[in-house]
Amino acid sequence: MRPVKIFSGNANIPVALEICRYLGVRLGEATVSSFSDGEIRVRVDENVRGSDVFVIQSLSDPVNNNLMELLVMLDALKRASAQRITAVLPYYAYARQDRKDQPRVPITAKLVADLITTAGATRVLTLDLHTGQLQGFFNIPVDHLHGTPVLLEPLRKIAEEKLVLVSPDAGGVERTRAFAKRLQSPLAIIDKRREGPNQSQVMNLIGDVTGRTAVILDDMIDTAGTITQGAAAALEAGAKRVIAVATHAVLSGPALERLNKSVLDEVIVTDSIPLRGKEDVCRKIRIYSVAPLLGEAIKRIHEEESVSSLFI
């Protein structure tokens, strides 16, 4: 069997190292830096000819810099004759720009998918895409993991409480229903109207949350407007307390201030995006690692085994 090699850009090195520990391999040697004018400079410092290579890079802030690092690394590995190159994207940026909902706007999620493919990726491994349909933007195989196994762990620890799983909008109902089924809990939905980018207003809460611990589940927390407004609505509707759960902690703009001032008891997230001390600013944040999940998926892809069986 061809050797497996793990490389990482600078976006999320702690997760890359933890994945390597899980797999029992060392992190591949590569120089990923910048010239004085900001151009990305990459050099692969070991032989990868004929190898099964996995490049770990979250497309988090600074998004464009991390995306460019990924593209240049993929091109370097392709030109170094790696046999298969899998782009491992714990967080896929530009995913919300996935449709032409106004005149004269791009579909940037598709553009980024094309860039990754053209740069040299022959496969993509990613986690909790904003919408599942994004897999169709790639003309190469995509293994789409769900954060369910990671995020269920802390929820099961409070399973003795009466839980109600709350979807922050209609689009998240399928994800929330999957959690509700696993936890054998009822489901509620927040009726939300978005007035512009990063602007939302809670309109109504559909379902009964009275006397229960409300768990608001989303794929990401960006500016935290939806989560904090939803938490207030749930508490007003009679919830005993409110917890937020999300895979990707983007936490941009006023997010930390909003979370600190909110009625939320806890904010449970993963390390798909490095928080870099934000958890110290907001003590409500609890972080769970996606490295074992990604590591097991990488192992199964390398050994040509089923990845979907991880979620049965």
Image (spheres, helix red, strand yellow):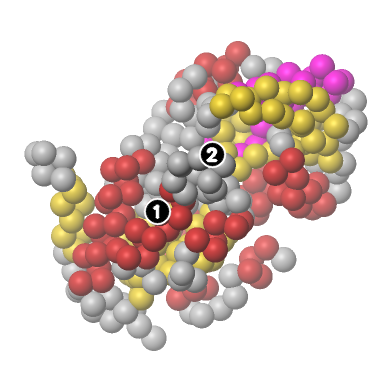
Q: Give the labeled residue for mark 1.
A: 112
Which stretch is magenta?
A: 225-249
Name the residue at 74% across, 40% down.
Answer: 170
Q: Which amino acid type is shown beneath numbered disc 2?
A: Gln
Looking at the rendering, in which quadrant would you find the C terminus?
bottom right
Give the mark, 1 or 2, whose residue is nearer the N terminus. 2
Residue 256 pos. (x, y %): 51, 21
Name the residue at 56% across, 51% down.
Answer: 129
- The image quarter in which residue 205 lies: top right
Q: Which residue is outermost to the left?
A: 36
Q: Which residue is outermost to the top?
A: 261
Q: Give the labeled residue for mark 2.
A: 102
Name the residue at 50% across, 57% down.
Answer: 126
Specify whether residue 227 is painted magenta.
Answer: yes
Q: CA distance from mark 1 to mark 2?
A: 19 Å
Q: Is residue 25 left or right of residue 144?
A: left
* 155 lies above or below 124: above
Residue 65 pos. (x, y %): 28, 43
* 304 lies above or below 6: below
Residue 20 pos. (x, y %): 39, 60
Q: Which amino acid type is shown beneath numbered disc 1?
A: Val
Between 288 and 52, the residue placed more toward the observer is 52
Specify whether residue 71 is painted magenta.
Answer: no
Task: Please say whether residue 76 is visible from this viewpoint.
Answer: yes
